[in-house]
Image: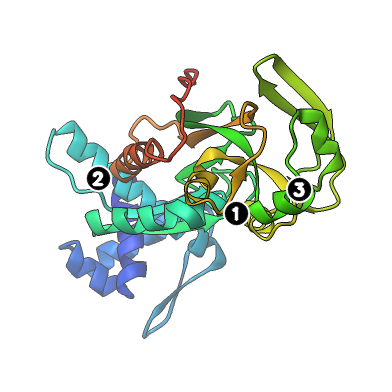
């Protein structure tokens, strides 16, 4: 418990700006707070605070340590409340990572709704088309669309959407409509710049079909790729959630409607913790519900226990 007292003294001193203010908040004396912080620095072997007659400043080591110490205290408070079966209010900072396309199209609005529901939660939403390291980048929850699942994280399956071949009406009016998969070789095929090969594998009524395609245009952003399709640049494969509304409005047309590409799988990744913070649990449940409402989805496979 002395370690918790020292962490609390340090965090309060930083956030309130002085040892005396921390002492008042903790209902103790300024010398006691000073002693606790000094003991914490000795145990860590680093200096956390620079003290002057008028204010405190964090050292580089203190800056890095403060955020983790604050989180440790929040999680301890939530674990105690949970153990005592008391009512809880989700609170604290959430750092969430998600792909840019789904983030811009859906997650941003969902996160604003989530924050309105939980006024004591802060959030950093990081929209990037790369696989982030949750532990190194201090990410609480990551939404991953397909790709490898790290074995040291919980992976909760939350969605599965077929990929559909789509084009604009103008493109098809100019270049004609493919009637069979091999016809795609004569068209402008747009693809995501993932560094993979040029083969396209489609699943159809007669089983999987492999088509060798050459793409003149490859782009590393799914929203930009879809915008290129809308502008009549060619045919592309897109997850059903991203094109369902455009297909319904007639802005896009499905190509080879009896064939689909590899399904896009969605997982929520988060660290395995004995006492998962309440804010993480409620966010995971919230996102699971919202992702299940995306159009064109199929029942997600159950995640393997980790």
Q: Is residue 52 above or below residue 38?
A: below
Q: Position of residue 243 (x, y in %)?
A: 54, 46
- Residue marked by disc 3: 190
- The quarter of the picture where the N terminus appears is top left
Callouts 3 and 2 close, C-beta under 8 Å: no
Residue 29 seen by the camera = no
Residue 180 seen by the camera = yes
Q: Residue furthest top?
A: 206
Q: Residues within 10 Å of mark 1 (few under 14, many from 20)?
A: some
Q: Quadrant of residue 230?
A: bottom right
Callouts 1 and 3 close, C-beta under 8 Å: no
Q: Position of residue 88 (x, y in %)?
A: 17, 44
In the rendered picture of this protein, how many numbered marks are placed on residues? 3
Point out the tag, 2 or 1, that comes first from the N-terminus.
2
Q: Quadrant of residue 49?
A: bottom left
Q: Residues within 10 Å of mark 2 (few under 14, many from 20)?
A: some
| Residue lying at 19% horizontally and 32% vertically, measured from the top left | 83
Q: Along the line of sight, which residue is nearer the eye, 207 or 50?
A: 207
Which secondary structure, mark 2? Answer: helix
Q: Position of residue 4 (x, y in %)?
A: 31, 47
- Residue marked by disc 2: 77
Q: Indicate left or right for 115 with 191 as reference.
A: left
Q: Indicate left or right for 261 with 277 as reference.
A: right
Q: Which mark is residue 23?
A: none
- Residue marked by disc 1: 128
Q: Is residue 31 above or below residue 291?
A: below
Which secondary structure, mark 1? Answer: loop
| Residue lying at 75% horizontally and 43% vertically, measured from the top left | 194
Q: Position of residue 44 (x, y in %)?
A: 50, 51
Q: Along the line of sight, which residue is nearer the eye, 220 or 234?
A: 234
Q: Residues within 10 Å of mark 3 (few under 14, many from 20)?
A: many
C-alpha separation, residue under disc 3 versus residue under disc 2: 51 Å
């Amino acid at each position: 418990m002395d370690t918790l007292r020292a962490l609390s003294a340090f965090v309060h001193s930083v956030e309130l700006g002085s040892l005396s203010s921390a002492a008042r908040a903790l209902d103790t004396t300024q010398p006691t707070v000073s002693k606790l912080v000094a003991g914490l620095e000795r145990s860590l072997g680093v200096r956390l605070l620079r003290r002057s007659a008028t204010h405190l400043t964090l050292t580089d080591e203190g800056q890095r340590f403060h955020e983790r110490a604050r989180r440790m205290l929040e999680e301890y408070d939530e674990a105690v409340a949970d153990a005592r079966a008391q009512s809880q209010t989700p609170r604290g900072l959430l750092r969430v990572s998600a792909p840019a396309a789904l983030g811009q199209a859906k997650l941003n609005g969902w996160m604003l709704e989530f924050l309105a529901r939980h006024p004591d939660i802060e959030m950093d939403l990081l929209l990037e088309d790369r696989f982030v390291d949750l532990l190194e980048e201090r990410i609480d929850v990551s939404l991953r669309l397909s790709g490898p699942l790290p074995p040291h994280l919980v992976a909760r399956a939350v969605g599965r959407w077929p990929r559909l071949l789509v084009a604009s009406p103008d493109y098809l009016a100019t270049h004609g409509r493919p009637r069979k998969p091999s016809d795609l070789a004569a068209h402008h095929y747009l693809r995501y710049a993932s560094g993979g090969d040029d083969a396209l594998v489609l699943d159809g009524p007669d089983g999987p079909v492999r088509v060798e395609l050459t793409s003149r245009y490859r782009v590393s952003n799914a929203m930009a790729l879809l915008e290129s399709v809308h502008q009549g640049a060619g045919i592309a494969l897109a997850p059903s959630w991203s094109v369902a509304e455009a297909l319904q409005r007639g802005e896009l047309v499905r190509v080879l409607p009896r064939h689909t590409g590899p399904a896009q799988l969605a997982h929520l990744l988060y660290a395995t913790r004995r006492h998962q913070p309440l804010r993480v649990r409620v966010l995971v449940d919230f996102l699971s519900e919202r992702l299940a409402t995306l159009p064109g989805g199929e029942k997600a496979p159950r995640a393997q226990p980790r």
